[in-house]
Image (cartoon, rainbow, N blue to C red):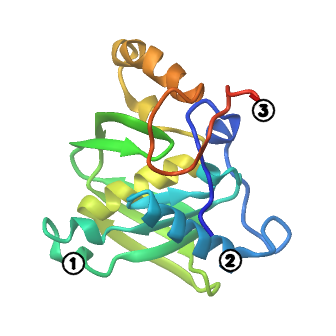
Amino acid sequence: MKLPIVAYGDPVLKKKAVEVTPETEPNLKQLIDDMFETMYAARGVGLAAPQVGKSIRLFVIDASPFEDDEPELKDFRKAFINAQILDETGEEWCFNEGCLSIPDVREDVYRKPTIRIAYEDENGQHHEETIKGLAARVVQHEYDHIEGKLFTDKLSPLRKRMLEKRLNDISRGMVKADYKMKFPAVKKGR
C-alpha cells in the first residue's frame, strides 16, 4: 500500500526516532513492504519511517538506479532497522541531494565517502558492514532522518535563508509532487 509522504515542516521529521520493537511496530514486515512500494512510486532511492509519519528507527534503500556509476549497486536493496553509524571516514565530497519530503529542492551536500554501520535486517539478523560511495551517501541521508535531521540542516545559514520561502510553501502544500503527500500547515476540511 502506498503511504502519504510527510512534507517539510512536520514535527515528526525533526524528532529523533525510537528503537523498533514489536511494541513500537507490530506490523514491521508490512510497513517495510509499504515503504518500498511508496519509495518506488515516488521514484526515490531511500525512504525513512519518519517520512511516512512513524518515528521509529527504520529506513529502506534501493540504490540500483546508481548502478551505471557504481555497478556494485545493482542489487543494493535493503531495510535498515535500529541502525547505528559506527564510523564515517574519508575526505568529504559534494553531491546534489534531494528528498521526497522536500520536493523540487536539490542542494549540494558534503558527506564522508565511507561509513561503518550496524543494523538489523527485516528477519532480525544483525549486520555490521562498511559501505562506500553513493550507497554510503544514501544511507547517511536516510540515517539523518531517523536522527531528526534533514539535508537542509547541512546547508549554510545564507543558503537556508534563501530557501526559506520555498520550504514554507512546501509545508503549506504549495508544491507539485507526483505522489501523495501530507502537508503539516494545511488545515483539515479545506
Residue 67, by quadrant, is bottom left
Q: Position of residue 170 (x, y in %)?
A: 51, 28
The structure residue drawn at horizontal position 40% and vertical position 15%, both measured from the top left corner, is 157
Which residue sits at x=57%, y=38%? 7
What residue did someone put label 3 on? Answer: 188
- Depth check, mark 3 against mark 2: the one in front is 3
**Circle nearer the N terminus (3, 2):** 2
In the rendered picture of this protein, how many numbered marks are placed on residues? 3
In the image, 168 versus 188, the foreground residue is 188
Q: Which residue is mark 1?
A: 72
SS label for mark 2: helix
Q: Quarter of the image holding residue 162?
A: top left
The quadrant of the rendering that contains the C terminus is top right
Identify the mark nearer the N-term, 1 or 3: 1
Q: Quadrant of residue 184?
A: top right
Question: Considering only vertical position in the picture, is 36 above or below 146?
Answer: below
- Camera-nearest residue between 106 and 72: 106
How far from the left and from the top, in percent, is residue 72? 21, 78
**Which mark identifies residue 55?**
none
Name the kind of residue labelled 3 in the image.
Lys
Between discs 1 and 2, the one toward the N terminus? 2
The Cα–Cα distance between marks 3 and 2, rounded to whole angstroms, is 28 Å
Packing grade of label 3 (10 A; few <14, some 14-19, many >=20) is: few
On the image, the x and y values in percent for residue 111 come to 31, 45
Q: Which residue is mark 2?
A: 30
